[in-house]
Image: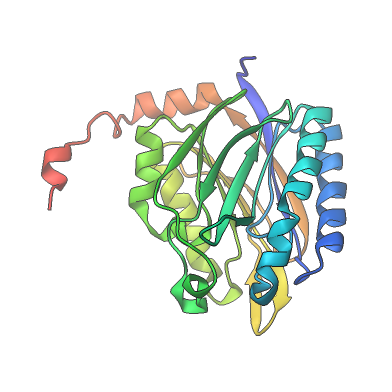
C-alpha cells in the first residue's frame, strides 16, 4: 500500500512505575481512540509498560511478549503501526528495546538502545545495543531511536542515509532539560530532512519529574504537534510529497562532502 499522506500520533503517558496493568490499560485506550480516528502510526514513550522499575526488570521483561501480542492485535485491527520501547530479556541480559509493529500486526523490526544514559545508571541494568535500525514497513522506511540517542546526531544521520523518511523516538526525558529535547528533535528533523515523531512521558517517579513536550516535526523543522506536560495524544499529517519538496528545494543531503568530515 502506498500513502501520499497519513496521520501520525504520539501518545504521552504518565507511566506508573512497575504497574504494568495500569500502563497497558492507558495505552490501549489511547491507541484504540487513535485507530478509530484513522491514525496510521502511533508512538508510545520509552519503557512505557513498566517505567524504569530497575529492580524488577527481569519480571517485567518476561511479560513483554504478552504486551507485544496486545499491540499486534490493536495494530492489525486498525491497520496502524505502533511503536514503543519495553524491556527485552535475553540470555546475556536485558535490553531497552524499541518494537515497531506493522499494520498487519507483524513485528517490522526492533532496535536495542545504543546510548545508555549513565546519569541515571542505565548501564547497571541494561545492555547496550550496537547497531542502527531502519525498518521497511507498509508506510515506508522508518528509523528507530530512543531518548538519549537524540543527543547523538550521528545515529540519526545514518538512519537518513539508510533511507528513513520518518524517525520515531520514544523517551523518558526529564523536565529540567526538556528545552533540549525540544531543540534537538527539531534539529534532527531539520538537518536530516525527515519527519520526527517523539513521544516523551510526563509525570513523576523516584525523584524525577518528566517533561512531556511530545512532538511531531516536519522535514523543514516546523513543529506540527506539541504537547504540554500532562497526559495527551497529538496527531499531525505526514506528507511524503512535502518531504520530497523540502529535499529538492534544499538539497543538503545530496550535497554532503563525506571526505571533509573524516577525523
On screen, residue 166 versus residue 230, left or right, reads: left
Q: Can you name the residue that lies furthest to the front here? A: 91
**Relative to 121, does residue 249 appear above or below in the rendering?**
above
Front in this rendered view, residue 46 or 233: 46
Quadrant including the N terminus: top right
On screen, residue 111 versus residue 248, left or right, reads: right
Q: Which scheme is used to colour this image of the protein?
A: rainbow
Front in this rendered view, residue 137 or 234: 137
Q: Residue at x 17, y 39 (%)?
A: 258
Q: Residue at x 76, y 66 (%)?
A: 14
**Relative to 183, does residue 196 appear above or below in the rendering?**
above
| Numbered marks: total | 0
Q: Can you name the residue that lies furthest to the top here? A: 1
Residue 140, position in %: x, y? 55, 25
Q: Can you name the residue that lies furthest to the bottom here? A: 207
Rendering quarter of residue 236: top right
- The answer, for residue 255, to whether it is visible in the render is yes
Residue 181, position in %: x, y? 51, 62
Residue 168, position in %: x, y? 56, 44
Q: Residue at x 75, y 72 (%)?
A: 17
Amino acid at each position: 500500500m502506498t500513502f501520499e499522506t497519513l496521520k501520525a500520533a504520539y501518545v504521552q503517558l504518565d507511566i506508573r512505575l512497575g504497574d504494568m496493568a495500569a500502563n497497558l490499560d492507558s495505552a490501549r485506550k489511547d491507541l484504540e481512540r487513535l485507530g478509530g480516528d484513522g491514525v496510521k502510526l502511533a508512538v508510545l514513550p520509552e519503557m512505557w509498560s513498566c517505567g524504569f522499575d530497575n529492580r524488577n526488570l527481569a519480571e517485567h521483561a518476561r511479560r513483554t511478549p504478552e504486551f507485544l501480542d496486545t499491540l499486534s492485535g490493536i495494530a492489525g485491527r486498525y491497520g496502524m503501526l505502533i511503536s514503543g520501547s519495553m524491556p527485552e530479556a535475553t540470555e546475556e541480559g536485558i535490553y531497552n528495546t524499541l518494537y515497531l509493529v506493522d499494520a498487519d500486526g507483524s513485528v517490522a523490526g526492533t532496535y536495542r538502545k545504543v546510548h545508555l544514559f549513565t546519569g541515571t545508571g542505565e548501564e547497571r541494568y541494561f545492555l547496550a545495543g550496537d547497531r542502527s535500525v531502519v525498518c521497511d514497513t507498509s508506510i515506508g522506511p522508518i528509523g528507530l531511536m530512543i531518548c538519549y540517542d537524540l543527543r547523538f546526531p550521528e545515529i540519526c544521520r545514518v538512519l537518513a542515509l539508510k533511507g528513513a523518511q520518518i524517525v520515531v523516538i520514544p523517551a523518558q526525558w526529564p523536565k529540567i532539560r526538556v528545552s533540549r529535547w525540544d531543540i534537538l528533535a527539531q534539529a534532527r528533523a531539520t538537518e536530516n530532512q525527515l519527519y520526527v515523531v517523539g513521544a516523551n512521558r510526563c509525570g513523576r517517579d523516584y525523584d524525577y519529574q518528566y517533561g512531556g513536550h511530545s512532538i511531531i516535526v516536519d522535514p523543514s523543522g516546523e513543529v506540527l504537534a506539541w504537547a504540554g506536560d500532562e497526559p495527551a495524544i497529538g496527531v499531525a499529517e505526514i506528507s511524503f510529497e512535502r518531504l520530497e519538496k523540502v529535499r529538492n528545494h534544499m538539497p543538503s543531503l545530496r550535497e554532503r562532502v563525506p571526505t571533509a568530515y573524516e577525523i
